[in-house]
Image (tube, rainbow, N blue to C red):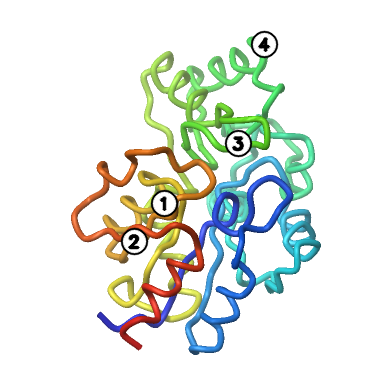
Amino acid sequence: MTIRGVLLDIGGVLYVGDQPVDGAREALEGLRAAGLALRFITNTTSSPKRSVLDKLARMGFDIEPQELFTPAAAARDWLAVRGCTPWLLVAEPLLEDFPDRDGEPDTVVIGDAGPGFTYEALNRAFRLIMDGAPLIALAKNRYFMQPDGLTLDAGAFVTALEFAAGVEATVLGKPAPDFFIAALSSIGCPAGEAVMIGDDWESDVDCAMEAGLGGILVKTGKYAQGDEAKLNPGAEVAEGIAGAVELILRPL
């Protein structure tokens, strides 16, 4: 398999909490030195793109804005194409990624709202959906890793609304295949010549493989012992991003 492009998750792969994963900066340098095109795809929906880039820069990662793909950007495009006005259940800092929200809301958009997932907020979303508003999920992850442990992600609340309203959400971030394909399209790389590196066996690795990419699971971040046994055949496993890059560069 000839590899031309690499997609990388960031939280749990490049860093955990506020600390870079050992060897992560050097691993990215190795990929760039080999001439591989990189795209960083994250399901982070609690911070705007600007803040994500700033955090990466503070940890020594040199990533250009066009290299970072976020669900908020995908949602903004989705809304603009359809002329929709969102009702947003997201963390307050993310609102800056949605400047066009004037008018009567006709679409429910849900990201990681954290403490904002109150009964009142969820019930407002439920009522809008029951009145015909589409349900848009910026991501549908079950949980993510924080410095103090695993934490519920937006997927738990999206699924609750799907169940209550009898609808199916449109997912714009991982694990939606179009999210992976859009990132690859920006570098002109077909899925069959790309690999995804992630710490989530399901939404990172398996779903990327279902979209036609290769997949490497790293044992950092949210990885839990035994996750590798759940992977689709053909997936590879590495202790961390440094090991994943060794696997990618091995045949070059």
Q: Is residue 211 left or right of residue 186?
A: left
Out of 251 and 1, give the one closest to the viewer: 251
Q: Which residue is mark 2?
A: 215
Q: Are marks 2 and 1 in contact (CB under 8 Å)?
A: yes
Eye-nearest disc, 2 or 4: 2
- Marks 1 and 3 close (CB-CB < 8 Å): no
Estimate the spatial distance between the alpha carbons at disc 2 and disc 4, rounded to whole Å.
40 Å
Residue 44, position in %: x, y?
61, 46
Residue shown at the point (44%, 57%) measured from the top left: 239
Circle 3 Cα neighbour tier, 10 Å, few/some/many (<14 / 14–19 / ≥20) = many
- Amino acid type indicated by mark 2: Gly
Secondary structure at badge 2 equals strand
- SS label for mark 3: loop
Provide residue 76's location: percent of width, then percent of height: 62, 51
The C terminus, quarter of image: bottom left
- Sequence order check: which comes first, mark 2 or mark 1? 1
Rendered image: mark on residue 111:
3
**Residue type, label 3:** Gly
Name the quadrant containing residue 197: bottom left
Q: Which residue is mark 1?
A: 204
Q: Earlier in the sequence, mark 3 or mark 2?
A: 3
Mark closer to the chain start, 1 or 4: 4
Q: Amino acid at mark 1?
A: Asp
Which mark sits nearer the N-terminus, 1 or 3?
3
- The tag earlier along the polypeptide, 3 or 4, is 3
Q: CA distance from mark 3 to mark 2?
A: 25 Å
Across and down, in percent, residue 184 comes to 44, 71
Alpha carbon of mark 2 to alpha carbon of mark 1: how far?
A: 8 Å
* Residue identifier under label 4: 120
Element carrying mark 1: helix
Label 4 is placed on what type of residue? Glu
